[in-house]
Image (spheres, rainbow, N blue to C red):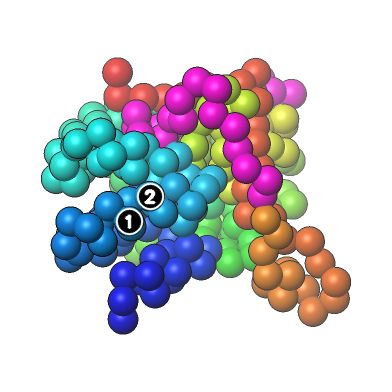
Amino acid sequence: MGWQEEFEQIAKDNIHGATYLLQKAAKVLEKLPDLKRREAIKKLPFLQPYMASFYNLARFLENGGKLEEFFANERRQKEALIQKASKLIEEKRVLTHSFSSLVFEAIKSARNVSVITTKSAPLNEGEAMAKELFELGVDVRVIEDAAAAYMVKDVDIVLFGADGIGDFGLVHKIGSLGIALAAKLYEKPLYALATPSKFWPRGFRLPPQPLQNPKEVSELPAINYYFDVTLWDYFLPLTSD
């Protein structure tokens, strides 16, 4: 399989998060000679245009940075952020949505935390995270996505990952906006965990979001978007700084 086909697989992956997909793209880049690597780097931002880390990795490499340097810094930032987030949620009841590796690790590291997670339809990645947490002995409950706004009143904190953060707000799994509105209504803090690579530069504009496979939602005519945008008034970014 050529690198173009591997990139196409990454572009079509609608289950895994930004961390997993970016590492997969990096492994493809590592195998390429310089000329093809430069060509591939130019395509990086378009693989997952709603994930800021693809944009930022491409910009970093185009400015002469090295893959190992980028990911070493990412690891340091993630370790610090996981430690910070785990302390924030200790002894707390947390609601989360979708499957963020940072949220997962923070919950895993926290003491005496209980978790409510949405199923995260249509692909149910939230339920997949709940299964892993349950197997680790975490007190976790799964709810239907439609119940999330109602359940916000019963938690201490809402904790999201971040596919990207820009001037316009937080890009995250579809359904995040409704949860954020409920958190504001019930005066519950909502934090989005984000390393520096999850921030787009000032002035960045999101491209139009494509519709995804309607069959994931229903055999009937359906609308299927993967992401929504939560305005700055409704969340706080939690960084390692």
Residue at 19% over, 36% down? 64
The answer to whether residue 173 is seen in the rendering is: yes
Question: Dot 2: within a 10 Å radius of its alpha carbon, few (fewer than 14), some, or many (20 or more) residues?
Answer: some
The segment highlighted magenta reads 184-209
Residue 166 locus on image (x, y percent): 53, 27
Q: Give the distance between the C-alpha atoms of the residues marked 2 and 1, in whole angstroms.
A: 5 Å
Q: How many marks?
A: 2
Residue type at mark 2: give it. Answer: Lys
The vertical placement of 110 against 101, above or below, is above
The vertical placement of 101 against 196, above or below, is below
Please check the rendered image and state whether residue 159 is part of the magenta-colored stretch, yes or no. no
User: In the shown orientation, is residue 31 left or right of residue 11?
Assistant: left
- Outermost residue toward the front? 35
The vertical placement of 7 against 86, above or below, is below
Res 151 → quadrant:
top right
Q: Pointer 2 and pointer 1: residues touching (CB < 8 Å)?
A: yes
Residue 153 locus on image (x, y percent): 67, 32
Dot 2 falls on a residue whose secondary structure is helix
Residue 202 locus on image (x, y percent): 50, 20
Residue at 46% over, 56% down? 47
Look at mark 2 in the image and give the residue it sits on. 42
Residue at 33% over, 57% down? 40
Give the dominant element type of the magenta stretch: helix, strand or loop.
Answer: loop
Viewer-proximal residue among 142 and 57 = 57
User: In the shown orientation, is residue 111 left or right of residue 213?
Assistant: left
Viewer-proximal residue among 120 and 51 = 51
The vertical placement of 91 against 149, above or below, is above
The answer to whether residue 139 is seen in the rendering is: no
Look at mark 1 in the image and give the residue it sits on. 39
Res 143 → quadrant:
bottom right
Residue type at mark 1: give it. Answer: Glu
Dot 1 falls on a residue whose secondary structure is helix
